[in-house]
Image: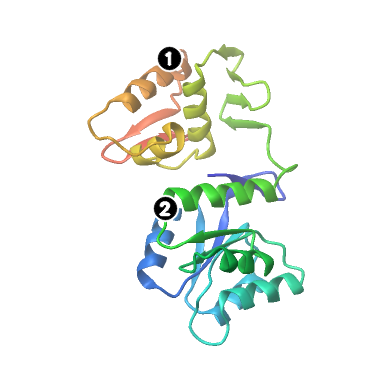
Amino acid sequence: MLGRIDPVGKETPVKVLLVEDNARVARFVVNGLRESGYTVDHSETGRDGMLLAVSETYDAMIMDRMLPGQVDGLTIIAGLRASGVRTPILILSALSEVDERIKGLRSGGDDYLTKPFAFGELLARLDALVRRSTVGHQETTLAVADLQMDLLTRKVTRGSRVIALQPREFKLLEYLMRHAGQVVTRTMLFENVWEYHFDPQTNVIDVHISKLRQKIDSESDHPLLRTVRSAGYMLSADE
């Protein structure tokens, strides 16, 4: 998950508006996004969704195409684009024909995902939309306490000490740093760092976490990487 930089230079969670009338689908998406670190507002109707979209600032929107009442998803999107709102929009729809997808994109949608869908694909598409919309504004360094990561040179330091990381360790640390202060579950790490589904029989995460902890914390009096019992892991500057 990506963060955005606020006016005072602090990275804050990406804020998403979900407009979806199906309670089961909405609960599935909202819970998944929040577990992944997003801030989510949810509207069940097109009218309320339109009001939120024009009155709040969002990094992205997920819009169900078929909504109850006279204001459907495509009507909302067309109205937002006409009023100058350029927030990236991912359309959700059970209509999978090529003509329907074209219609959705031409109405002003940025991507189109058909139902039923895998949450991992929705998250990947959402991340891609946010990345494209914030290009040129992305940070080139990450920092947690005296631990710093240069995303361009791929150099990692803690204080004056340079830390040599393998590619997978670098990706794991980057994900933890982007979610600093949050509990990161094993499932989240499997899906976002290893990019495959969680296998409860493997200890690959434990091995990599152990090696990473040794590299970043072994020579410091203030450990940053900790295990949260029965929950996952957290990288934090707080005691």
Q: Quadrant of residue 194?
A: top left
Check the image and report above or below for 10 versus 110: above
> In the drawing, does residue 164 fall left or right of residue 187?
right
Q: Amino acid at mark 2?
A: Phe
Considering depth in this image, is 142 or 120 the residue closer to the camera? 120
Q: Can you give x and y, in whole percent of width and height, for residue 166 in the image?
A: 49, 16
Please, which colouring scheme is shown? rainbow
Considering depth in this image, is 81 or 117 the residue closer to the camera? 117
Check the image and report above or below for 158 versus 27: above
Check the image and report above or below for 80 versus 220: below
Q: Can you give x and y, in whole percent of width and height, for residue 181 in the image?
A: 47, 40
Q: Where residue 218 is drawn, which disc sits there? A: 1
Check the image and report above or below for 131 versus 19: above
* Res. 36 in view: no
> In the drawing, does residue 10 fall left or right of residue 225?
right
Within-10-Å neighbours for mark 2: few <14, some 14–19, many 20+: few
Q: Amino acid at mark 1?
A: Ser
Considering depth in this image, is 145 or 166 the residue closer to the camera? 166
Q: Earlier in the sequence, mark 1 or mark 2?
A: 2
Disc 2 designates what residue? 119
Q: Residue at x 45, y 33 (%)?
A: 193
Q: Nearer the viewer, mark 1 or mark 2?
A: 2
Residue placed furthest toward the left: 201
Q: Where residue 199 is drawn, which disc sits there? A: none
